[in-house]
Amino acid sequence: MCEDCFDESEVPGERPSLPRLMQAARHIERDFPGEAVPSEAWVIYLGRRSGTIDWPAMQRIARAMEAAGLLLSLTPGGDLRN
Amino acid sequence: MNAPPRPEVLHSANVTPLARLDIPGGGEVVVHRNHAFIGHMSPPDGTAIYDVSDPRRPRQVARIAPPDGFSHTHKVKVAGDLMITNVERHKRHFFRKGERIAAVTADLAATLGRPPQEAEIAAEIGVAPGDLDTLRAGLARGYQDGGFRVWDIADPANPRHLATVHTGGIGVHRFDMDERYAYISTEMEGYVGNILVIYDLADPTRPREVARWHMPGQHVAGGETPSWPGQRCRLHHALRVGDTLWAACWYAGAHVIDISDITAPRTIGRFNYHPPFPEPTHTFFRLAEPIAGRDLALMIDEEHDHVPGQPHGFLWVMDVSDPTRPVPVSTFHVSERESPYARAGGRFGGHQFQERQIGSLVFATWFAGGVRIIDIATPETPREIGHYLPSPAPGHASPQSNDVDVDERGVVYVIDRDRGFDVFSFAR
């Protein structure tokens, strides 16, 4: 953590391993009502390509990631990290 | 043995490197009347002023030391003949840990049934055992020096001190100013985290407080209780455009503050996206001129400790045609694959953009991603049209591009957080 900028209360929380998180998040996102997020938006979100993500897609991805993190935290083995 | 060759600057074809100065790391660079004003990160380096009339040969013309060895003066703004530099406790977040030593020691003693060892206390606080003495010394010394200093820079080579203003707590972080007012982000007695304090500079030798603004929960002396731990929700800084301040409030998101009555700032709009988005709001800036017929603002988050599965800090394009209800239009992301330094060490993601409008162009720093030049002519689909990656400073694994400004000639100035000052030109 950069102590020039961030306080102790700002340490990121534990996250499940990325492959498990992604698998769960994409599954959850597909089940949301409305238009599914294009695959390219996921690729950009994960930093594998530069580009633009529109707000509806960002909201869907973020909500799906949050739900997946919660789901895996309640699942045995969901606390594995990269 | 020969030293390993330094990596070259990496840049797109439409960028021309002009100069690189090996100078201490900086927190802010502002260009005004052919001079670059730089706030350095750490004492004993304070503020440096460079003549950039010839951008290929920047020439230092003045240096100002911090007021003491416990403060840094890493932010600077200039308006007309006035310059303001901040004074903030150096390593402020580190020294806050010292406030926990007594409680942690007592808790450990109760748990262990014996006095805890230094290593146990240090582990609990999250510092190295050797840091405890430094923390105790800092706690005993306290800090009363925070605030800002006002200078006359009519002759940039000879800045003349006009006033020192003490504020409170750890002092002043980033801020905005014009020739009449200063919009200061600072801690103040009785508040948790930075708030906004507006000072009248009509007599710059005697800045006069005219107003305060804070978020509900910050004013603990007034009976408010924060709903967040620590200083998570605080003003980073607010930028004035017209009669409105566009305030980036860290984990409280973006706030729009009406100052048509300068003595009575009032919140008229907000947009908070924490959670689910992980990185704090660093800068929120209204573009004075519409783009594609739309009233827009830019917003950028500061990269944190990156966690896989979370996006790196990124740029937001916001529709602010209704300032009471800022709405995102699009988000722009830079891939780790765009920088060979993305995983070399240090932070990678976004941090800051130039705090002035250059048509539809945004010059934004990504720490290890350098300066990305982004065109938002079509706000729904921002497009990168150029980039500049400084070479890492000697002894550092990656560049940490921290702040950027652009002058009237289109010359771009970028300061590295660790070390180095780069100048380049850009052609569309």
Image (cartoon, coloured by chain):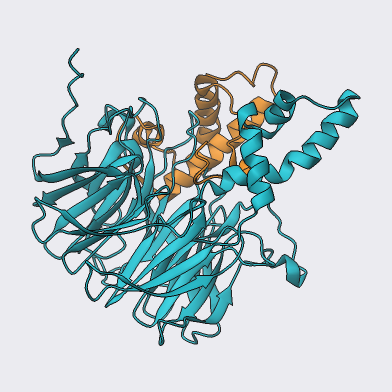
Residue B229 in view (yes/no): no
Q: Position of residue A48 (x, y in %)?
A: 34, 29
Q: Dividing the picture into quarters, in which one does residue B51 lie?
A: bottom left
Q: Position of residue B89 (x, y in %)?
A: 53, 54
Q: Nearer the viewer, residue B191 or A14?
A: B191
- Height in image: B370 above or below B197? above
Q: Position of residue B27 (x, y in %)?
A: 37, 51
Q: Residue at x 88, y 24 (%)?
A: B114
Q: Residue furthest top?
A: B1
Residue B287 in view (yes/no): yes
Q: Dividing the picture into quarters, in which one does residue B219 lie?
A: bottom right
Q: Residue at x 64, y 21 (%)?
A: A79
Q: Nearer the viewer, residue B372 or A39?
A: B372
In the displayed structure image, the side of residue B149 where residue B366 appears, left or right: left
- Height in image: B170 above or below A40? below
In the displayed structure image, the side of residue B235 where residue B60 appears, left or right: left
Q: Dividing the picture into quarters, in which one does residue B360 lie?
A: bottom left
- Name the colour assigned to chain B in the rendering: cyan
The chain displayed orange equals: A
- Height in image: B308 above or below A36? above
- Height in image: B336 above or below B210? above
Q: Nearer the viewer, residue B179 or B137?
A: B137
Q: What is the count of numbered marks?
A: 0
Q: Position of residue B330 (x, y in %)?
A: 36, 52
Q: Residue at x 46, y 67 (%)?
A: B148
In the displayed structure image, the side of residue B340 where residue B286 appears, left or right: right
